[in-house]
Image (cartoon, rainbow, N blue to C red):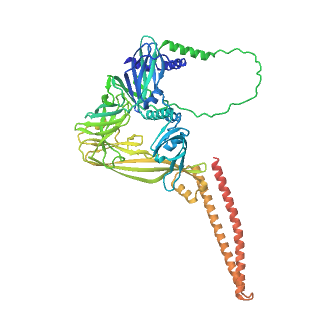
Amino acid sequence: MNNARSIRSRLPGLLLALVFSLGSLTFAQEAPTMSLPVSRVVLFTNGVGYFEHAGTVHGTQEVLLRIESHDMDDLLQSLVLLDLDGGSVQAVRYPSQDPLARTLASYSLDLSGNPSLADLLRQARGEGVRITAGTSLAGTIVSVETVQAPESAPLHYLNLSTDDGFRRINLAEVRDIRFDRAELRAEMDAALAAISRHRETDLNEVRLRFSGDGERRVVVGYVREMPVWKTSYRVVLGDDGSAELQGWAIFDNPTSLDLRDIEVSFVAGQPISFITSLYEPVYVQRPRIQPAVSESHVPPEYESMPVPSAPAPMMEMQARMADTLEDMGVSAAATGSQQGVNFEYRVSEPVSIPRYESAMIPIVQQTIPGQRLSVFDPAVRDDNPMRGVLLENDTGLHLAAGTVTVFDAGGFAGNARMADVLPGASALLTYATDLAVRVSREATTEPDTVTDVRLDSGLLVSTILHRHVTTWRLASDTDSTRLLLVEHAARPGFEIVEPEPAPVRTRDGYRLGVLLEAEAAGDVQERLSLPVQLTCDAGSECTLRVVEERVAASSVSLSTIESDRIALYLANYEFPADQRATLQEVHDLQVSLSGLRAELSRLNERRDDIFVEQERIRANMAGLEQSGSLYQRYVTELTEQEDELAEITERVAELRQEISDVEAERDALFRRLLNG
């Protein structure tokens, strides 16, 4: 078993050995074959397993692996070979698998794409055939024609050249066809055999050649597809705040390998794994070009130059490689239980799992802290909490995700699910409904409150407090002490300011503690590992109030604020003396502008009314005698209106100038504010 583990200490040297030995590779005579038993299996949670074979070879021998076709790609991209006692690794041979379409295209008649009889005979033009279609005929295939018949399927006709001339035969009437050439019949048989082989999933024989003298230890390792190993836990709750944790790993062996007395490891983690198409040959479509033709020239003679030697760094690197290969058949570093970000469970005793069987293997058996509690999560139930347990992982192990069966004093208590739990972390499990406790919720959003206003470079900045209150109402029918955890979803941007102490922060929210305390329970809180925000008597009703606040800033330019809003700020908020004076000045200017603009608007409206009235009067005067009294009255009214229009025009000009002056004064003030 120790020999098998040495693959992890010799991998770098192995890779160098493969690079240099393949450079001078020659295929030698057939060597005796043998099989190596599986010595170690490492299962991962990403659908692969690492298989390691170990044993002893004598002289030059070939090790035979039988690998299913669907596992060949994994093998070819992960195979590692070690000859530990001075031997060398040579060729790895296996049956090639050309793409089926390419194989079929190499025959005279291409059977790819499921051709019909008409398609097949079109490919065989010029071949001699014997046909039975009512009578027996012999001849050479000339062509196959298709006739589109109305409202029916197309008809196919075979045109045959016979000794008696051309014959046209309906393929629907042909009962059998036989090609004259034996070579063509053999190719047909070979193509059909290729289709059959491609469909089959037989084992492939992979030959691994180890060359050397005497008896030597060899190791073969590779990755192949395997079922994900599964974990299953049992938790027995104690009354003293502890829990017995028992973990089992489930190993499925759906392979044709009998695994006997092997070392087994389970890796908790998800290394990246993918499959590369290495088994099936890949061809590249290359362009075909004509050779370039150019003029012939007599080459000149050049001065000879010395051939440069290899650069010193390259020579040093080759020397280091040579020293490495000389010192070891292959060497590597040992790997412990911790594999980077992964954690390995290494089973201490050998394990045997026959082909197509499974096994449960114990991997954890420890006593850990386990606190009983109830958990109310509105996403699970909106009325009752769930019975649960908070486990603290002080095992030093990475507890892989799996199902948990919980037992207490009454026996089976329920099933739970557990995610991956790193060493030192905790896991909250829920396994049953707590019908003795009822929870309801009421949420309200209070009106926003402006807590502060200040002037900043021409901006009026307000600090606004948004406040949200959630009321949890709890009622219980139990007379025993319970710790109830309330899962409170976080509101983006909000922080809990009530109750105290601060609740536990989780990924998606908060975890609030409510202690339902029975009489004579003692100082229960000293034994709790979680903070408690509310304590109430078991069997009674109580309320937990959760207040969340978010502080936000809102800014608005002074140039856009109306005077009445500025007056509201001045009346209700405290400002430094200089800011208050500035705001008062802005307020007075805005009030002045408002008054001037209002007066200008009234004068413009009056002028419009006079224009309308004058149009009416002039229309009436058109039908009157100029000497009449009504005509003279209209003349008097028009005269008075013209005088009023003159006064309005003069005042409008004054107002526009006054507005312009006040606006200039206000804008100058805003510029001073913006410039600090």
Residue 458: x and y, percent?
61, 50
565 on left or right of 243? right
- Residue 323 shows in this picture: yes
The one nearer the camera, 282 or 542, is 282
In the image, residue 279 sits, relative to residue 144, either above or below, namely above
Image label count: 0
| Residue furthest out toward the left | 410
Q: Residue at x 39, y 20 (%)?
A: 36
- Locate residue 2: give its quadrant: top left
Residue 524: x and y, percent?
28, 37
In the image, residue 18 sits, relative to residue 158, either above or below, namely above
392 on left or right of 313? left
The one nearer the camera, 374 or 457, is 374
| Residue furthest out toward the top | 214
Residue 258: x and y, percent?
34, 25
The one nearer the camera, 444 or 578, is 444
466 on left or right of 234? right
| Residue furthest out toward the front | 164
In the image, residue 400 sits, relative to residue 673, either above or below, namely above
The one nearer the camera, 466 or 586, is 466
- Locate residue 166: give its quadrant: top right
In the image, residue 544 sits, relative to residue 265, either above or below, namely below
Residue 565: x and y, percent?
55, 58
Quadrant where the N terminus lies? top left
496 on left or right of 571? left
Q: Residue at x 71, y 70 (%)?
A: 649
- Residue 523 shows in this picture: no
